[in-house]
Amino acid sequence: MNKKLRVAVLMGGRSPEYEISLISGKEVLANLPKKYIGIPIVIPKNGNKWLNNLLEAKADICFIAMHGPFGEDGKIQGMLDTLGIKYTGSGVAASAIGIDKILFRKIMKAEDILMPKDTTKLPCFIKPHNQGSSIGASIVRNKTELARAIKIARRYSDKILIEEYLVGKELTCAVLGNNNPTPLPVIEIVPKKGEFFDYESKYSESGADEIVPARISKKLTKIVQELSIKVHQIIGAKGFSRVDFILKENKYPVILEINTIPGLTPMSLLPKAAKAYGLSYSELLDRIIKYSVYE
């Protein structure tokens, strides 16, 4: 009889997305296939006592269900590398590139991949350079809103982006795999509460309509999927990722960012895309773990 792998599910952390990470982690634990032994490891916003819990757990692998700084930016990955513990998802370099929107943009531009342009004109879109879930992000339409939006973004980061405000369909495409990744069905996002897919829209049940497959042509679907794979490979992402787009003038896919640890809550986009592809939540988790253990 094969030994069951011990999977420590890391959640929480020093991030504005702490609560969302807890929901992701609990969902992962609840859906782990029975061939794994799930061990919850909650990382508090302060303190390092959790590290003893992790070492005592004697895990074969860590499933990182942490979002934003200290979880998705390479820090926890570097620590686990030092400890010699395997983990799901991308390594240090890909994680650091993925969360740093300024560095990510430079790399994408070097690869001639279309991204929003920097601007000094209104309307514009302002966001911190290293946060997820649209935290600290704002649309600015007049000078009165500008100072407030900059102040909000700088609560979360000393570096901010001021970029053109693009109008068009919001799309996202998840990718699974390492060397030969597979794109999942493209999802179209239609926010119902705000002007864009902000934090409230992402995590409230009636915040947005998420249409899968997206209402775009087969040709555009293929372009979005191929771009998602290309971005995943350029930064060296592993296991899984999700790339967000704006379809400028409903014709041109403009990449907004890559998420190297997409949300795993019951309302998150990755599980929804996996389901449309034919994978249950448990099967999705099994694949993510296998990518880290066997590939």
Image (tube, grey):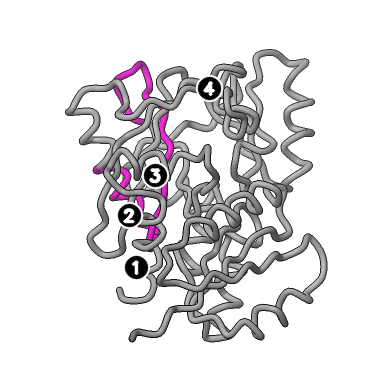
What amino acid type is highlighted by mark number 2?
Leu
Residue at numbered disc 1: 291
Drawn side of residue 118 relative to residue 238, left or right? right
The residue at 78%/60% (across/down) is 45
Q: Nearer the viewer, mark 4 or mark 1?
A: 1
The residue at 58%/24% (across/down) is 207
CA gap, disc 2 to disc 4? 30 Å
SS for dot 2? strand
Residue 145 sits inside the magenta stretch: no
Percent across and percent down for residue 124 are: 59, 22
CA gap, disc 3 to disc 1? 29 Å
Earlier in the chain: of badge 3 and badge 1, it is: 3
SS for dot 4? loop
Asked if marks 3 and 1 touch (Cβ < 8 Å), the reply is no
Q: Which mark is residue 176?
A: 2
What amino acid type is highlighted by mark number 3?
Lys
CA gap, disc 4 to disc 1? 37 Å
Earlier in the chain: of badge 4 and badge 1, it is: 4
Earlier in the chain: of badge 2 and badge 1, it is: 2
Residue at numbered disc 4: 165
Residue at numbered disc 3: 109
Look at the image and give the residue range highlighted in magenta: 226-253
On the image, which quarter does residue 195 sit in? top right
